[in-house]
Amino acid sequence: MRQIPDCRSYFSRLSETIEQLPFVDIDGITDVLMDAYDHGRMIFLFGNGGSAALASHLACDLGKGTVNGSGKRFRVLSLTDNVPMMTAWANDVHYEDIFAQQLENHVQPGDVAFAISGSGNSPNVLKALQIAHRAGAITIGLGGFKGGRMKGLCDRCLVVPSDNMQMIEDLHLCISHALFTCVRRKLEERERGVRCA
């Protein structure tokens, strides 16, 4: 890992990493989210720590920020938001089960399981992806470093090309905002098309 001696170096390196992002993968994930919207499928988001906060943030953006005049809405749920449920599974079974057991209750074929993990190796994230895959859900990963074990469990996995966790988390937020912006634009274009017809 290259040393970062000051804030200017941090932002310089962050800019370099942005230039290396796989933008085509962001477009591909946008398409998966739009397909889930079109077919009324659920989108489940999950992760640990900062990734848990981002799961909540993206669920809010998709669930509220995309509401338009059509009346149709994204069906989205962050599995990080029900603290009593998570602590019950962690206490009574195992911490690795906090997302997988929630998915067991809800996930259906064609739903989207959207995992966020900087390392790509969080056991509870991996277990949830396995449950989702077994149920016939579409699996998406947002990772960093080399993608970890998560990469092999995802239908689509966007890996931020960095070994710096702070930059990975910075860009995960940027990517989630890019996804939200692209989804909202597509919905607005559809709405304009309906008004013009």
Image (spheres, grey):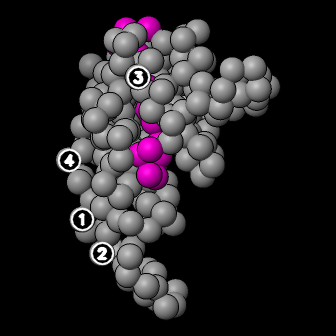
Cβ–Cβ under 8 Å for marks 1 and 3: no
- 88 horizontally vs 126: left or right: right
- In what quadrant of the picture does the N terminus appear? bottom left
What label does residue 10 carry, if any? none
Residue that sits furthest to the left in the current view: 24
Residue 136 rendering spot, x and y as whole percentages: 34, 12
Q: CA distance from mark 2 to mark 1?
A: 7 Å
Cβ–Cβ under 8 Å for marks 4 and 1: no
Q: Earlier in the sequence, mark 2 or mark 3?
A: 2
- 98 horizontally vs 31: left or right: right
Instruction: Say if the magenta span includes residue 7.
Output: no
Q: Residue at x 24, y 37 (%)?
A: 28
Q: Nearer the viewer, mark 4 or mark 1?
A: 1
Q: CA distance from mark 1 to mark 3?
A: 29 Å
Q: Residue at x 46, y 85 (%)?
A: 4
The quadrant in which residue 115 appears is top left
Q: CA distance from mark 2 to mark 3?
A: 34 Å
Residue 127 rendering spot, x and y as whole percentages: 48, 27
Q: Nearer the viewer, mark 2 or mark 3?
A: 3
Crowding at mark 3 (Cα within 10 Å: few <14, some 14-19, many 20+): some
Q: Earlier in the sequence, mark 2 or mark 4?
A: 2
Report which residue position mark 2 lands on.
16
Cβ–Cβ under 8 Å for marks 2 and 1: yes
Q: CA distance from mark 4 to mark 1?
A: 11 Å
Q: Residue at x 36, y 18 (%)?
A: 133
Instruction: Say if the magenta span includes residue 116.
Output: yes
What label does residue 24 carry, if any? 4
Residue 156 rendering spot, x and y as whole percentages: 28, 35
- 116 horizontally vs 89: left or right: left
Magenta residues (range): 108-121
Secondary structure of residue under mark 1: loop
